[in-house]
Amino acid sequence: MFKSSVPVLMYHHVSPVGGMIGCTPEHFEDQLRWLKQEGYKSLTLDEFAQHLAGKDQGKAVLITFDDGYLDNWVYAFPLLQKYQFKATIFLVTSWLHHGPVRPVMGQENVPNCPEHRECEALIEAGRSDEVIARWSEVHAMRESGLIEFHSHTHTHTRWDLMPDEAKNERMQWELEQSRLCLQKELGEVSEHLCWPQGYFDDDYIAIAQKNGFSHLYTTMAFGRNTSDTDSARIHRFAVRNRSAKTLAKRIRASHHPLIAPVFNNWKLLSRKLKNR
């Protein structure tokens, strides 16, 4: 018996500039339109957890965004509303500020939403409010019933790359601070965590689980999310700035019970050979 799989889509930006890990509103809408036409529904993280526990969720995907960029509010949210798709945004909690909501696509004086590297530079310069959603915008999206918010740590730092070898203590602090911030601003913290820059190891998994995070989201693209999937190693694949046809091929390849294992094993082997 074949087990059903739910593809987890990973986005960062939706804005007119597109860019390295961005998607234009035109391509994003094309992708959402295709999902709607093909009869897909988007899941909440609770529904996805139920899928991993064995509940059949039908024809479904999970739509996720990393970091909480301003363009998620300005461009992605209006399109998700238009097609009534649910999505999850993993927040880097130290990057968010307070202030009034800003205009969204279709309104006047829409804020500038630069490409990814410029966003990184502004965040590094202490100007994250210019490129990251505000708590007021988070609340507005949350109140729609379509968007939910979960932890992407507090500072998005790869402590394993730092000279300080106390990476485990640093990650413990990251998760504690993220939980405190989400509890203060949203009134709750879930069991779902997305690793910054996709890095994790066995130590980090143990620390996350100790801190109440049971469902851990990776950037491991080549695998099926079924009831056999380890909830500490959830697969996601990046959605590129391309038309719905490309997404359609990737979704079909990623979760088909016969095609997916062959496709995933071939991609993993190709990557190993390339990295030799």
Image (spheres, grey):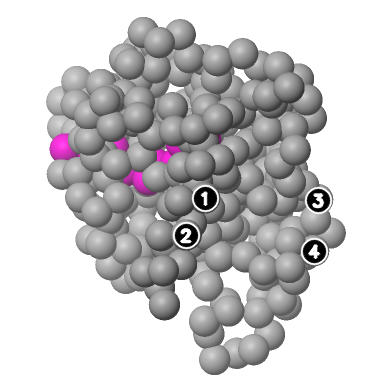
Query: Which of labels 2 and 3 is toward the front?
Result: 2
Instruction: Report which quarter residue 223 is drawn in.
Output: top right
Which residue is depicted at the point 43% across and 52% down? 267
146 vs 35, nearest the viewer:
35
Task: Give the Cα separation between the discs numbered 2 and 3.
Answer: 34 Å
Task: Tell me whether circle 1 and circle 2 mark residues in contact (CB < 8 Å).
Answer: yes
Q: Which mark is residue 206?
A: 4
Disc 3 marks which amino acid? Gly
104 vs 242, nearest the viewer:
242
Q: Residues within 10 Å of mark 2 (few under 14, many from 20)?
A: few
Q: Is residue 175 left or right of residue 242?
A: right
Q: Residues within 10 Å of mark 1 (few under 14, many from 20)?
A: few
Which residue is depicted at the point 78% across and 25% down? 54
| Residue 202 showing in the rendered view | yes
Disc 4 marks which amino acid? Ala
With respect to residue 230, does 142 lie above or below?
Answer: above
* Residue denoted by label 2: 269
- Identify the secondary structure beneath mark 1: helix
Q: Which residues are magenta?
A: 6-16
With respect to residue 96, does 82 lie above or below?
Answer: above
Instruction: Report which quarter residue 24 is drawn in.
Output: top left
* Residue denoted by label 1: 265
- Identify the secondary structure beneath mark 2: helix
Residue 43, given in percent of the width and then of the height, sits at 58, 23
| Residue 94 showing in the rendered view | no
Query: Which of labels 3 and 4 is toward the front?
Result: 4
The stretch drawn in magenta includes residue 14? yes
Query: Which of labels 3 and 1 is toward the front?
Result: 1
Q: Quadrant of the N terminus?
A: top right
* Residue denoted by label 3: 212
Give whichever of discs 4 and 1 has the lower sequence position: 4
